[in-house]
Image (cartoon, rainbow, N blue to C red):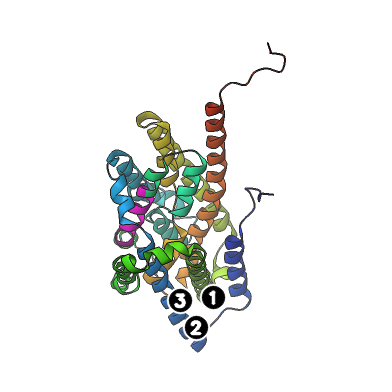
């Protein structure tokens, strides 16, 4: 029996568990320093595996559909940031500076890979194009996300971000990713043959970072300083942000693309990657601000999974009805 779409999966439950554990038993002092080195190593391993896993051939093969890919990248790295900046005057009096920083950071993240492709396949869309778009988004995101984050967040005067931290991207993210790309010819087949191990490293590294981030935030008094109305507003803002982007990508896709490519734009252009976002945030943001900064991403991630799963199933059922054709009525016959 399949899991109902509205229930969180085990990964989401693990993230919630990490937050609860950090709230009840936050790590601090010397153990926190050792734990920080462990998470740094886990992040480096994560991006090494991403570099070894992402196929440059898939990107090259789908590059001919340049209009579709440009639209996906525009939605990911232009539309989202514009919406995030536009909401600043409305949200500044309600969200804490750290939460708004997290919202801006969310807006500059790349698209997801696995779920974008999975939802495109479920909706009977153009899967090769989705592989190309999602992979290109993640390849660019490793470099573009820190640069956009530095520009947007610094221009807003938000706390918790240091431009000096961008240098850490080279050692903790870009270097492992590049080494993974170089090593792909030797380890790529092995990585592809062990998807469960790669998934475990992906999700395990994220859970480690979330526990450490929220431990630091709890030690800094996160829950005492975070108003309940700010959290509720964050839920509403995340839902509205997703609805606007889904509406724009759907309208553009329906107007300018065939149905299969419309689906790619809808799912690849509206998603934000938790797998890339939390490790990058760990490098860019220091101290107790990190927990509040990643909170908008965690909320948005769960909302996008639920909403996009429902949409993908509806697309899939419509495609099945279209291919099966009209069914004869019960009373018909020769």
Q: Residue furthest front?
A: 334
Could one spot residue 152 in this view of the protein? no
Please give the residue where the numbered disc 3 appears in the rendered image. Answer: 39
Q: Is residue 293 magenta?
A: no
* Nearest-to-viewer mark from 1 and 3: 3
Q: Image quadrant of residue 249?
A: top left
For the residue carrying disc 2, how many other residues have a C-alpha within 10 Å: few (<14), some (14-19), or many (20+)?
Answer: some
Left or right of 178? Residue 289 is: right
Location of residue 9 in the rendering, given as x and y in whole percent from the top left corner: 61, 57
Q: Secondary structure at mark 1?
A: helix
Q: Residue furthest right?
A: 331
Q: Secondary structure at mark 3?
A: helix
Q: Principal SS element in the magenta part?
A: helix
Q: Earlier in the sequence, mark 1 or mark 2?
A: 2
Do the residues under discs 1 and 2 have CB atoms within 8 angstroms? Answer: yes
Left or right of 62? Residue 242 is: right
Q: Is residue 231 above or below residue 71?
A: below
Indicate which disc residue 215 carries: 1
Indicate which disc residue 32 carries: 2
Q: Is residue 142 magenta?
A: yes
Q: Earlier in the sequence, mark 3 or mark 2?
A: 2
Q: Is residue 122 above or below residue 58?
A: above
The C terminus lies in quadrant = top right
The part of the chain drawn in magenta is 132-144
């Amino acid at each position: 029996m399949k899991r109902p779409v509205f229930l969180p999966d085990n990964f989401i439950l693990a993230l919630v568990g990490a937050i609860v554990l950090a709230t009840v038993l936050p790590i601090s002092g010397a153990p926190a320093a050792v734990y920080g080195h462990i998470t740094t190593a886990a992040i480096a391993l994560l991006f090494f595996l991403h570099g070894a896993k992402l196929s440059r051939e898939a990107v090259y093969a789908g590059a001919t559909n340049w209009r579709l890919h440009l639209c996906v990248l525009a939605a990911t790295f232009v539309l989202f940031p514009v919406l995030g900046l536009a909401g600043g005057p409305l949200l500044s009096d309600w969200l804490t500076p750290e939460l708004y920083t997290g919202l801006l950071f969310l807006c500059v993240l790349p698209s997801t890979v696995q779920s974008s492709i999975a939802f495109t396949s479920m909706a009977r869309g153009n899967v090769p194009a989705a592989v190309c778009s999602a992979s290109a988004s993640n390849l660019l995101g490793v470099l573009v996300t820190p640069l956009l984050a530095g520009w947007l967040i610094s221009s807003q005067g938000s706390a918790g971000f240091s431009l000096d931290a961008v240098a850490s991207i080279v050692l903790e993210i870009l270097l492992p990713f590049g080494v993974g790309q170089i090593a792909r010819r030797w380890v790529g087949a092995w990585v592809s043959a062990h998807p469960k191990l790669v998934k475990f490293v992906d999700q395990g590294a994220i859970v480690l970072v979330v526990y450490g981030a929220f431990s630091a935030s709890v030690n800094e008094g996160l829950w005492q300083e975070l108003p309940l109305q700010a959290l509720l507003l964050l839920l509403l803002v995340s839902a509205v942000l997703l609805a606007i982007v889904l509406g724009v990508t759907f309208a553009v896709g329906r107007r300018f693309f065939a149905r299969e490519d419309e689906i790619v734009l809808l799912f690849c252009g509206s998603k934000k990657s938790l797998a890339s976002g939390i490790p990058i945030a760990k490098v860019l943001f220091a101290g107790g601000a990190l927990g509040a900064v990643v909170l908008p991403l965690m909320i948005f991630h769960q909302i996008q999974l639920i909403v996009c799963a429902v949409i993908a199933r509806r697309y899939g059922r419509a495609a099945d009805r279209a291919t099966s054709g009209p069914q004869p009525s019960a009373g018909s016959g020769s």
